[in-house]
C-alpha cells in the first residue's frame, strides 16, 4: 500500500470533511432543526438573517463555508501536531483541541459574524455543543494520527495516492 504524497494535506482534508459533515448532523440533532436550516444558519454568518429565508443555494453556500472552516480548523491542528508531537497522545490532544474550537467558535467567530450574537446556552445545549466540539477535535486528531504517523496508527495510510 502506498502512502499519500502529502500526508498533512490529506489529514486536514479528511479530518475537515468528516468532522465538518458530522458537525452538521450533530447541530441538527442538538437543535432539532433540519440540516438545511443548519446550513442556512452557517451561511447567515456571512449573509446575515436574510439567509434563513433564502433559497436552497444559500444552504449550499452554508455547506461550502462549513467545509472550508472545518478544513481550516483541521489544518491548524495538523500544523501544530507536526511541530508539537500532538499525535502521540492524539485522543487527549483532540479533546483539548475540541475545547479550544468550542470557545473560539462560540465566543469569537459567532459574535463577529453577520448574525453577531453571543450564544446563550441552557445546561443541555452547553453540554451537547461542547460534546460535539470534543468529537470534532477528536476526529481531526484521529486523521492527523493516521496520516502523519501511519505506522504508529497500526498500518499504512488510509488513502492511496
Image: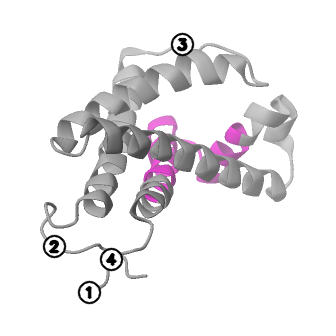
Task: For the residues labelled 4 and 3, say whether their Cβ atoms are less than 8 Å apart.
Answer: no
User: Sequence-wise, which precedes: disc 3 or disc 2?
Assistant: 3
Nearer the camera: disc 2 or disc 4: 4
User: Sequence-wise, which precedes: disc 2 or disc 4?
Assistant: 4
Quadrant where the N terminus sits is bottom left
Give the quarter of the image for residue 126: top left
Please give the residue where the numbered disc 3 appears in the rendered image: 120
Q: Is residue 28 magenta?
A: yes
The magenta stretch is: 18-42
Please give the residue where the numbered disc 4 appears in the rendered image: 3
Query: Residue 130: percent from the left, percent from the top?
Result: 37, 27
- Left or right: residue 107 compared with residue 80: right
Q: How is the image coloured?
A: one colour
Please give the residue where the numbered disc 1 appears in the rendered image: 1
Please give the residue where the numbered disc 2 appears in the rendered image: 155
Residue at the image point whose x is 13% and y is 60% from the top: 152
Task: For the residues labelled 2 and 4, say whether their Cβ atoms are less than 8 Å apart.
Answer: no
Q: CA distance from mark 4 to mark 1?
A: 7 Å
Q: CA distance from mark 1 to mark 3?
A: 49 Å
Residue at the image point whose x is 66% and y is 54% from the top: 63
From the viewer's side, name the closer residue of 61 and 88. 88
Q: Tell me the element at label 4.
A: loop
Q: Tell me the element at label 1.
A: loop
Task: For the residues labelled 4 and 1, say whether their Cβ atoms are less than 8 Å apart.
Answer: yes
User: Sequence-wise, which precedes: disc 2 or disc 1?
Assistant: 1
- Left or right: residue 149 compared with residue 124: left
Task: For the residues labelled 2 and 1, say whether their Cβ atoms are less than 8 Å apart.
Answer: yes
For the image shown, how many numbered marks are present on the structure?
4
Q: CA distance from mark 3 to mark 2?
A: 44 Å
Task: For the residues labelled 3 and 2, say whether their Cβ atoms are less than 8 Å apart.
Answer: no
User: Sequence-wise, which precedes: disc 1 or disc 3?
Assistant: 1
Amino acid at each position: 500500500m502506498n502512502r499519500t504524497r502529502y500526508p498533512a494535506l490529506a489529514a486536514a482534508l479528511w479530518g475537515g470533511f468528516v468532522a465538518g459533515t458530522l458537525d452538521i448532523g450533530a447541530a441538527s440533532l442538538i437543535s432539532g432543526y433540519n440540516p438545511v436550516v443548519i446550513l442556512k444558519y452557517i451561511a447567515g454568518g456571512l449573509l446575515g438573517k436574510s439567509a434563513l429565508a433564502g433559497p436552497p443555494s444559500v444552504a449550499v453556500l452554508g455547506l461550502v463555508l462549513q467545509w472550508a472552516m472545518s478544513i481550516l480548523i483541521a489544518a491548524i491542528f495538523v500544523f501544530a501536531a507536526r511541530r508539537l508531537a500532538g499525535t502521540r497522545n492524539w485522543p487527549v490532544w483532540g479533546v483539548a483541541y475540541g475545547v479550544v474550537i468550542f470557545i473560539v467558535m462560540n465566543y469569537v467567530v459567532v459574535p463577529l459574524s453577520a448574525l453577531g450574537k453571543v450564544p446563550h446556552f441552557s445546561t443541555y445545549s452547553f453540554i451537547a455543543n461542547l460534546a460535539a466540539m470534543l468529537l470534532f477535535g477528536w476526529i481531526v486528531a484521529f486523521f492527523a494520527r493516521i496520516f502523519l504517523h501511519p505506522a504508529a496508527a497500526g498500518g499504512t495510510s488510509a488513502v492511496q495516492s
